């Protein structure tokens, strides 16, 4: 059957695209310094093409002291010399564009690195200077101002204020090395417009906006305490989070995006109340927003169904498409999450925000991880996700069925959350370990001289080399599914089909594409097993086994 949709060419790519997230320092190392680099990405352009994705999103590759894996940006308009040059970037862009793959870069506007020239100048210029107005400097409280201005806590733990040599304090909602910018300042606004134009002019197709809900702040005195802030509604007027006035910034960015042909795209990383997501996803603002609900759900039919219903409704409200994510560089990989017991939920059914981190903290020993079940469920969840209307975001290594790495010694950990929690929160290094390209040899083919985070011996079993040659591997399944999706993906709707089982979901798209996922353990009889076009279990049956998904067409 010809399932190609007639209006496919008229739809902008990002509405139904598959975006592959590359974490550049851990993807491929071309110059043998144990850090992945831009030329490494170029050298793997064929691999990305064979995977069958529409776009690549690059986590930050800018000059950075790596206090937060590159999200501490020292210069927004350059490439970290350890990762290459702007010329290398242009080569990579040409290599990906030449293969029909779009490129999205990460913009980090809430904070700079403390090494950014603005912050260095602010430090040198001293209190009361115009240079300090680009950030949030305040006097301390208590005797000699030796206490922070407020009791605010950073997202990575510890005080959100840091004292500089002359006694003033500055706000950093993340690491000490990430001072928050003052978005009331016109120079800050103007400079980010310049940055967006800089990358757009180079040919970049879109932007991922880091912590898009935190830029604007009402810092008028007196500053409120954490207790007072927590008591305020998140209604767009909250002093710190998800303020309506952030959309004035994005309205200006929209003009920039739309001044290009085709218009540049953006996706918001905005951890906000559901009802407010459409503000970020609307055409007047950034145009698309991440939805992390699937990433926070257990492998559970009821939760998956609710997440899909809610988010398709929200997409309707914004006019944007839905987005779906199972893994990224901030969370425990989904193959591992699904191999661990379901986490405790609060009375409202809200998920534990960091499922799997207790397992990481135990060094991977407790609770017991069922690796095989995790991988089965991860494949089933991915096939379920890829059949949904909207854009899917994949994270490097998930196509290999990679598990989180728990066995990283404290001395080799890099994530600031580990240091700021005095070692209690083991952080996100375990999903950022450099990819295994070969089954053996130096750093499993990542580079010629080691890898900046240690790779465990079992990485060889998940290498690209090994999986590319096995028709039943996770990599082969991703390739098959993505190729089929290219033909099948259609407009933003689906119809649920009754299964008579609480643990089995079945939906149908308007072009006849059907998907059944068995979240339970009892096999589910398939009426149309002769029409299966893709299936996550390694062997096919008349009945769908537990932890499995099939596609029909
Ligand atoms: C990024 C994190 C980063 C944080 C601060 C997040 O949204 O995804 O990796 O640590 O922003 O920039």
Image (tube, grey):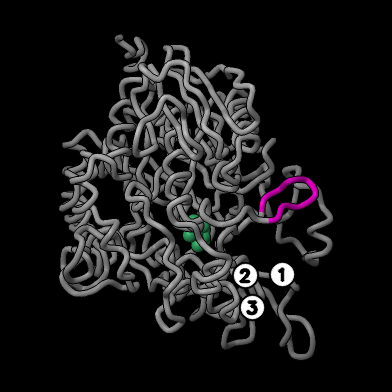
Residue 143's x, y, as percent?
A: 78, 90
Q: How many marks?
A: 3
Q: Mark 1 or 2, which is nearer the eye?
A: 1
**Label 3: few (<14), some (14–19) or many (≥20) C-alpha neighbours in 10 Å:** many
Residue furthest to the bottom in view is: 143
Disc on res. 467: none
In the figure, 48 relative to 409: above or below?
above
The magenta span reads 344-351
Instruction: Give the quarter of the figure containing the N terminus.
Output: top left
Residue at image position (47%, 21%) is 526
**Label 1 belongs to which residue?**
152
Circle 2 Cα neighbour tier, 10 Å, few/some/many (<14 / 14–19 / ≥20): many
* Left or right relative to 18: residue 156: right
> How far apart in space, not on screen, are marks 1 and 2 (Cα)?
9 Å
Tell me, for residue 171, which label it has, or none.
Answer: 2
Q: Do tag 1 and tag 2 residues touch (Cβ < 8 Å)?
A: yes
Q: Is residue 28 visible?
A: yes
Q: Quadrant of residue 452?
A: bottom left
Q: Residues within 10 Å of mark 1 (few under 14, many from 20)?
A: many
Q: CA distance from mark 3 to mark 2?
A: 7 Å
Q: Is residue 377 magenta?
A: no
The answer to whether the residues at label 3 and label 1 have Cβ atoms under 8 Å apart is no
């Amino acid at each position: 059957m010809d399932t190609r949709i007639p209006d496919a060419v008229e739809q902008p790519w990002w509405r139904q695209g598959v975006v592959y997230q590359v974490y550049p320092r851990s993807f491929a190392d071309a110059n043998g310094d144990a850090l992945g680099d831009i030329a490494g990405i170029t050298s793997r352009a064929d691999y990305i093409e064979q995977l069958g994705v529409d776009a690549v999103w690059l986590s930050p590759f800018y000059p950075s002291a790596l206090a937060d894996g590159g999200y501490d940006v020292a210069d927004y308009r350059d490439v970290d010399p350890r990762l290459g040059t702007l010329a290398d970037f242009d080569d990579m862009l040409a290599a990906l564009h030449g293969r029909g793959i779009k490129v999205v870069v990460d913009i980090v506007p809430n904070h700079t690195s403390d090494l950014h020239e603005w912050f260095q100048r602010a430090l040198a210029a001293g209190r009361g200077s115009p240079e300090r107005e680009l950030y949030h400097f305040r006097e301390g409280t208590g005797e000699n101002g030796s206490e922070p201005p407020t009791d605010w806590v950073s997202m990575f733990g510890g005080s959100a204020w840091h004292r500089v040599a002359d006694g003033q304090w500055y706000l950093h909602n993340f690491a000490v090395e990430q001072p928050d910018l003052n978005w009331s300042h016109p120079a800050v606004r103007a400079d980010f417009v310049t940055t967006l134009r800089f990358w757009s002019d180079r040919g970049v197709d879109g932007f991922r906006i880091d912590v898009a809900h935190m830029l604007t702040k009402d810092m008028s005195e007196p500053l409120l305490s954490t207790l007072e802030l927590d008591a305020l509604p998140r209604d767009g007027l909250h002093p710190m989070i998800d303020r309506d006035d952030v959309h004035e910034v994005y309205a200006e960015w929209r003009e920039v995006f739309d001044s290009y042909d085709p218009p540049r795209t953006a996706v918001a990383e905005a951890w906000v109340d559901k009802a407010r997501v459409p503000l970020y996803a609307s055409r007047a603002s950034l145009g698309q927003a991440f939805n992390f609900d699937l990433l926070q759900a257990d492998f559970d039919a009821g939760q998956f169904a609710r997440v899909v219903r809610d988010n398709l409704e929200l997409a309707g409200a914004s006019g944007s498409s839905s987005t779906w994510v199972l893994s990224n560089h901030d969370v425990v990989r989904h193959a591992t999450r699904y191999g661990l017991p379901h986490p405790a939920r609060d009375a409202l059914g809200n998920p534990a925000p960091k499922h799997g981190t207790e397992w990481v903290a135990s060094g991977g020993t407790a609770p017991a991880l069922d690796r095989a079940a995790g991988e089965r469920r991860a494949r089933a969840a991915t096939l379920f996700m890829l059949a949904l209307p909207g854009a899917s975001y994949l994270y490097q290594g998930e196509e290999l069925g990679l598990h989180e790495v728990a066995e990283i010694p404290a001395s080799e950990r890099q994530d600031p959350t580990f240091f700021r929690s005095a070692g209690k929160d083991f952080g996100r290094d375990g999903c950022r370990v450099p990819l295994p390209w070969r089954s053996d040899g130096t750093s499993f083919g990542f580079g010629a001289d080691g890898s900046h985070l240690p790779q465990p011996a079992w990485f060889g079993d998940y290498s690209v080399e090994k999986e590319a040659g096995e028709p039943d591997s996770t990599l082969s399944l991703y390739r098959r599914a993505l190729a089929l999706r290219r033909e099948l993906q259609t407009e933003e709707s689906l119809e649920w089909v009754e299964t008579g089982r609480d643990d089995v979901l079945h939906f149908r798209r308007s072009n006849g594409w059907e998907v059944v996922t068995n979240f339970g353990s009892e096999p589910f009889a398939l009426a149309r097993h002769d029409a299966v076009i893709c299936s996550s279990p390694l062997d096919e049956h008349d009945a769908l086994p537990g932890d499995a998904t099939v596609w029909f067409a």
